[in-house]
Amino acid sequence: MNRKKKLRIYQFSLLFLGILIIFFTYINNEKITEEKIISSETQKKIKKQLADQSSAGDVFFNIEYSGLDLAGNRYILKSKEAKNSKDNQEIVYMKAVEAIFYFKDGTILNVQSEDGIYNNKTLDMQFNRNVKATYEGSELLAQKAEYSNSKSFLIISEKVKVNDIRGSMLADKLYFDIKKQTLSIASNEENKVNANINLK
């Protein structure tokens, strides 16, 4: 009887010791796994990114808007990547932008830029960084272009250069009246425009 009691005590002790080992091993492994998978620094970064994304708005790819401006000209606006503003749903921020304006007289204006902003209510557009426009065989290079639908004009500014079969021209600002189809040229430096025109 004594031997059986000792054996039971011994078995119970081993079982209790085994349970303790398993319990502590599991807790330590869980802590190590948590630390290895996501450190506290990484967790903070992830939370910040998620917060930034939620405040920045939704991102869309290969989008296209089309319609008529107030002057009755048709346009198509394309972007490889765009995101709307959470604060103002009318504003869309774009990357790799292209706009094509089909005027009623049959002419076409093509404008491209690295970045852009589109107001889907007023239909106003802004083109930024490495702006390139082509119209009737002329090529225009600049850093900024603004299209106003309500006032029916296109202002091109910042390092403006026009290349044409008749020559080339440097200016500070070009003002294109879409209704009248007229172009005004302005220069800040003593009102001079640097032009090289081929008269032949």
Image (tube, rainbow, N blue to C red):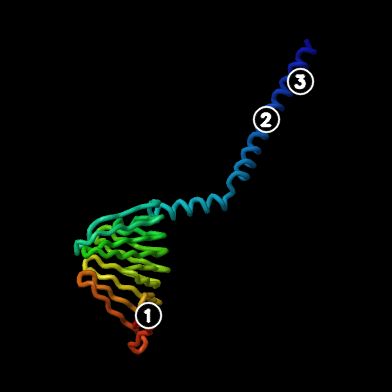
Tell me the residue that label 1 is attached to.
169
Q: Kindly report the distance in space between the C-alpha atoms of the residues bearing marks 2 and 3.
A: 18 Å
Task: Using residue 113 as the reference point, say whether residue 11 is left or right of it.
Answer: right
State yes or no: discs 2 and 1 in contact (Cβ < 8 Å): no
Mark 2 against mark 1, which lies toward the viewer? 1
Circle on res. 8: none
Q: Nearer the viewer, residue 164 or 148?
A: 164
* Residue farthest right in this picture: 3
Give residue 61's position: percent from left, percent from top. Answer: 40, 51
Q: Earlier in the sequence, mark 1 or mark 3?
A: 3
Give residue 162's position: percent from left, percent from top. Answer: 37, 75
* Type of amino acid under label 2: Ile
Q: Nearer the viewer, residue 190 or 60?
A: 190
Q: Residue at x 35, y 71 (%)?
A: 138
Tell me the residue that label 3 is attached to.
10
Q: Residue at x 43, y 53 (%)?
A: 53
Q: Quadrant of residue 69?
A: bottom left
Q: Earlier in the sequence, mark 2 or mark 3?
A: 3
Q: Kindly report the distance in space between the C-alpha atoms of the residues bearing marks 2 and 1.
A: 82 Å
Quarter of the rendering occupied by the N terminus = top right
Q: Quadrant of residue 106?
A: bottom left
Tell me the residue that label 2 is attached to.
22
Mark 1 against mark 3, which lies toward the viewer? 1
Q: Residue at x 21, y 63 (%)?
A: 104
* Type of amino acid under label 3: Tyr
Give residue 88's position: percent from left, percent from top. Answer: 31, 58
Q: Earlier in the sequence, mark 2 or mark 1?
A: 2
Q: Nearer the viewer, residue 100 or 60?
A: 100
Task: Using residue 108 as the reference point, say whether residue 5 is left or right of it.
Answer: right
Q: Kindly report the distance in space between the C-alpha atoms of the residues bearing marks 1 and 3.
A: 100 Å
